[in-house]
Amino acid sequence: MTRRGWCRTALSPSHLPGLDYSLNPYKGCAHNCVYCYAPPLLHMDRNRWPDVEARINIPQVLRREVKVKKPGIVGLSTVTDPYQPAEKKFELTRKCLPLLLKRGFSANVQTKSDLVLRDRDLLGSSDRVAVGITITTLDEDLSNALEPGAPPPHRRLQAVKALAEAGIYTYVFWGPLLPSLDEESLPAYVEAFASHGAREIMVDMLHVKPGVTAGLSAVLPPDRAALFEQRLRGDYYPRILEAVERACRGRIPLTRAFADRGGP
Ligand code: SF4
């Protein structure tokens, strides 16, 4: 059940690299990923994170702000998913996008949901749009355990393909890269992303924020939870990130993400 809320500000200054503003039409996220960084960042109870608030007046507030704020790059969204299920009904992201684009702002949209395809027309209407599809794993069971409210990985891959075919700059946000991955599996991932039309990969490691370890232990089989814990304590990430770089070299550009990104 999504409740209605109201906001006073639509565009907030962003401290994330590459973004001038963040725009979060929703508070909370029904994708309910076990590793989500947003609840601790916002000092919220993780258990209440899936109780979503839709900021229903955000298009009106944004309409005023775009007339007076300096155009820049807007991240949609930085601490929630702009195409989570509530967007189907409220269409807040859909209403905000044209307001930004008409006033010279750029949009960097990041989502785990193929609902983004609904807005292909809008997203493809400007070369000031980039869309990132977040894919943490191609293992459907693992995704189902860790991202229970999000569309499965195969649908996200199809979304990459459809967006790319629509001429939209599309990248894969491969993060958090889950400690289940072994070096041998990396080339297949890179090939899957590139062959579906991603123009670049942005990779990030799993940052263990409060509540994450307990959440992983609660949803993973004991042997896998133990493997995660062991790898999170060791030198897994420096090694695997170097291996990701090798796998991408000559095939697709790779960038490293930043530590404190909230979502989606
Ligand atoms: S990680 Fe992103 S998609 Fe998952 S619950 Fe957090 S904001 Fe939503």
Image: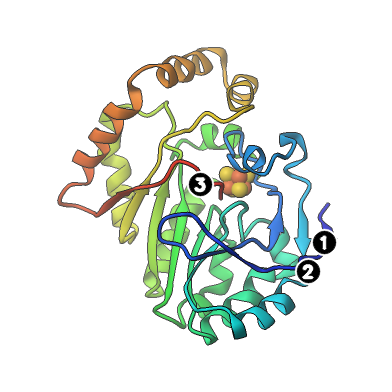
Q: Residue at x 64, y 79 (%)?
A: 65
What separation in Å lies between label 2 and label 3 (alpha carbons)?
Answer: 24 Å
Counting residues from the start of the chain, the first of labels 3 and 1 encountered is 1
What separation in Å lies between label 1 and label 2 (alpha carbons)?
Answer: 6 Å
Q: Amino acid at mark 3?
A: Arg
Query: Are discs 3 and 1 less than 8 Å apart at CB?
Result: no
Q: Amino acid at mark 2?
A: Ile
Give the percent coordinates (x, y) of residue 76: 56, 63
Q: Which residue is at the front of the view, 132 or 15?
A: 15
Q: Is residue 10 above or below residue 241?
A: below
Q: Residue at x 44, y 21 (%)?
A: 232
Please indicate whether residue 27 sits to the left or right of residue 106 in the image.
right
What separation in Å lies between label 3 and label 1 (alpha carbons)?
Answer: 24 Å
Secondary structure under the numbered disc 2 in the rendered image: loop
Which residue carries the number 3 mark? 261
Which of the 4 image quadrants contains residue 43?
A: top right
Q: Is residue 180 above or below residue 37?
A: above
- Numbered mark located on residue 5 in the image: 1
